[in-house]
Amino acid sequence: MPKFRKSVPMSELREQMTDEQRQQHETTYQASRGGWFPTKNKPVPGTPKE
């Protein structure tokens, strides 16, 4: 009888993601807001706004 696990480690899920997916789901810790929040795209100098 196979043994099933209740959860999958985050490190294992991270290994399966592409670099683009990792960037999309990246978070940073902000103590002033009290937790982890998605990072916002920072503007790159020289690129026009759309």
Image (cartoon, grey):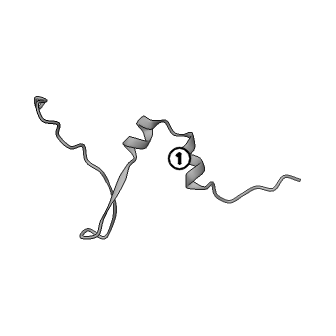
Residue at the spot 17% in from the left edge and 40% down from the top edge: 43
Residue name at image x 17 percent, y 36 percent: 44
The residue drawn where x is 30% and y is 70% is 34
Location of residue 45 by image quarter: top left
For this orientation, the residue located farthest to the right is 1
Of 10 and 6, the residue lying toward us: 10
* Residues packed near mark 1 inside 10 Å, few (<14), some (14 to 19) or many (20 plus): few
Q: Where is residue 41 in the image (x, y as percent from the top left)?
A: 24, 43
Q: On the image, numbered disc 1 is attached to which residue? A: 14
Label 1: which secondary element: helix
The percent coordinates of residue 49 (x first, y second) are 11, 32
Where is the C terminus found, in terms of image quarters? top left
Across and down, in percent, residue 17 comes to 51, 39
Where's residue 15, x and y in %?
A: 56, 43
Q: Which amino acid does label 1 sit on?
A: Arg
* Along the line of sight, the residue nearer the viewer: 18 or 4: 18
Q: Residue at x 11, y 30 (%)?
A: 46
Viewed as shown, does residue 22 lie left or right of 16?
A: left
**Quadrant in which residue 6 is drawn:** bottom right
Residue 33 in the image: above or below residue 46: below
